[in-house]
Amino acid sequence: MRYKERLNKLTTLLQLNGLQAMIIWDNYDLLYFTGVNGPGALIVDTNGETRLYVPPINYEAAERYAFPGLNIEQTRIAEPLEVVVAHSILGFDGAIAVDRMDVEIYKRLANMAPNIEIRPSMSLIWEIRSVKDSQEIGIIHEACRISDRAMLAASDVLCPGITENEVKSEIVSEIYRQMGEKPAFEVIVASADRSSLPHGPLQKADKRDRVINNGDVVVIDLGVMVEGYCSDITRTFIIGKPKDNEFEAIYSSVLNAKDAAQSFMRSGVSCSYVDSVARSILSEKELDKHFIHGLGHGVGLEIHEPPRLAPNSPDQLMEGNVVTCEPGVYFEGLWGVRIEDTVLITDKGVEQLTNYPVDQYIVY
Amino acid sequence: MRYKERLNKLTTLLQLNGLQAMIIWDNYDLLYFTGVNGPGALIVDTNGETRLYVPPINYEAAERYAFPGLNIEQTRIAEPLEVVVAHSILGFDGAIAVDRMDVEIYKRLANMAPNIEIRPSMSLIWEIRSVKDSQEIGIIHEACRISDRAMLAASDVLCPGITENEVKSEIVSEIYRQMGEKPAFEVIVASADRSSLPHGPLQKADKRDRVINNGDVVVIDLGVMVEGYCSDITRTFIIGKPKDNEFEAIYSSVLNAKDAAQSFMRSGVSCSYVDSVARSILSEKELDKHFIHGLGHGVGLEIHEPPRLAPNSPDQLMEGNVVTCEPGVYFEGLWGVRIEDTVLITDKGVEQLTNYPVDQYIVY
């Protein structure tokens, strides 16, 4: 990874914003700028060196995975990292940025360094992280390839009588078989009235698993992590003949909404506009009121990143963004349909990175 | 769950601390007090009602899973929750607590309600959450039972020639078969020199899987989630005859350290003392410098919670705490041993909740 290029970009942004340094506290940001998973804290000094503080539990991993030449300092066991950070910034006299930090830790840190302005500045990091370079795109491509395979493995076993957990097992096993690092998030296999809950339901004691039956709608939402990067795909299946005659028409509407929204995506287009395209297609069939979430989100080291494709989003698509396009309609207590792909934004449009077929949704 | 009892305790603590209300922003806390997974925000008013704000994507789930009688209000799609919260607290005139919140959102919220002191007060929540009631203990018991079964499934397939990912697949499948909700965290199967990294390593492109060979040490760290609650267990295996003659002696030392530390655990004992017991046993063989992390942590809705068993920890064990006891020694670049169980703290000592045998660590 181009860690030094990333740090150079960050240094430039800090200088442009009158910031002398930045505390990188969040684990994803730490990984992005150093190659090291947390716990740890990175101090990026525009006038000096970059230094990574890690506790002993993470020191060997830091030595193995940090980019060559990074200064790494080991803290003591159970020493609070904010104390270490406070000491390291005491000599500064300008404003210092911080990425993400719980307010309580922030207040402790600010109290230990009372003469220094510590300014939350996550937007600077997103400016860099939301645009993927060719190496990141290659990795996300691979994560998407594996997620297509995992969806295929799921559809291969889907049949009346199988349980949701059995389908999940197949998906996770296929992810490991295909050399995925792990699922990017807990796999959702939501059948029948569970499919009307976009994130899948809580698993109450009496319903920790469920048999999938003929006529059930099944929403499968899965992602794969490869070298820290995520993919995200959702497909909706129907087992045999749908109980609801409307199913096929509604499936088509959701697919049309997705296709239309995607056809408007390219660098320079506003995210709220793309969201509104999907919403207006669904409104033709009065389905827009059942589309109860935003159209999509950025995907990278985190499964939900900027840009945010939603009503009122201030974000604009840029070349190198990787985002999801995932319209869905949900009928409370009954069933739902969501179709989602991960796409790369280019200057001409999109390149779709997940490609499991959308027309093979009937399973016998 | 005893949601109303929990809210009553919280209300009492708020009143004792001169706080008029609390904003519950964190998703785990939200689940603990309402039964609803996030996204959402809960306002607990000591003088009035408790109200849950959820975005449309989460409204149906909130209606299904909230305790009966909870006021639930739906926000608009993509409306920032902090704006909703700011409106809802504008009428207050006393100090208001908040659990956990990113500093940037906190600052936005504080700006929208400039006359109100919003005080980070997570310690009040931990006071309640760290003591588990009988219902929670029953669920964690079940999560621990499943984690023992998952460890058995792993040991059943462990043999020279199997890969780390194949072992992970078996573990995850067994968790689903046993009606676990999901793995409580990404399963760690770390063989050979990977076992010297307590959290398992990053998975670089060329090493996303690895064949386990004769003579390898394999550290397996897994947890299971049941109804939101976690378990945590680690076992270290050796495939056939160890390459390092010291292995068995060191395994024994780690086990002795664990047994000794556990024998001192009971309500009223300080966490740093229990940590020091394990450290002193390991120091007899000069292994303490290889014990590069704290002895353990609380387990509940989160896999890492207070109390923290570590040097300098200010925490004290209390009846009803569920914690891990997990000494480990790590030889940089070579191998490591960690043995971990989840235990319940009682007034007399501990009840060990994970019970996979510690003496069946040789696998052929």
Image: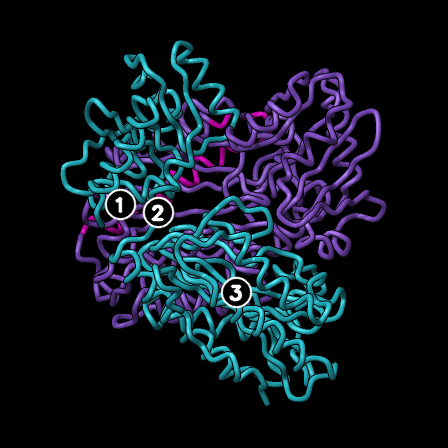
Chain colours: A cyan, B purple
- Image point (19%, 23%), residue name: A48
The chief SS type of the magenta part is helix
Q: Which mark is residue A35?
A: 1
Left or right: residue B178 compared with residue B14:
left
Q: Chain of mark 1?
A: A
Mark 2 vs mark 3, CA separation in Å: 41 Å
Magenta span includes B265? yes
Q: Which mark is residue A261?
A: 3
Q: Amino acid at mark 3?
A: Ala
Quarter location, residue A242: bottom right
Secondary structure found at label 1 = loop
From the top left corner, tell me how far across and down residue B142 is, in percent: 61, 56
Q: Are marks 2 and 1 on the same chain?
A: no
From the top left corner, tell me how far across and down residue A226 is, in percent: 34, 60
From the top left corner, tell me how far across and down residue B292 is, in percent: 31, 35
Q: Which mark is residue B199?
A: 2
Magenta segment boundaries in residue numbering? B245-271
Indicate which disc, 3 or 1, sits on the residue closer to the N terminus.
1
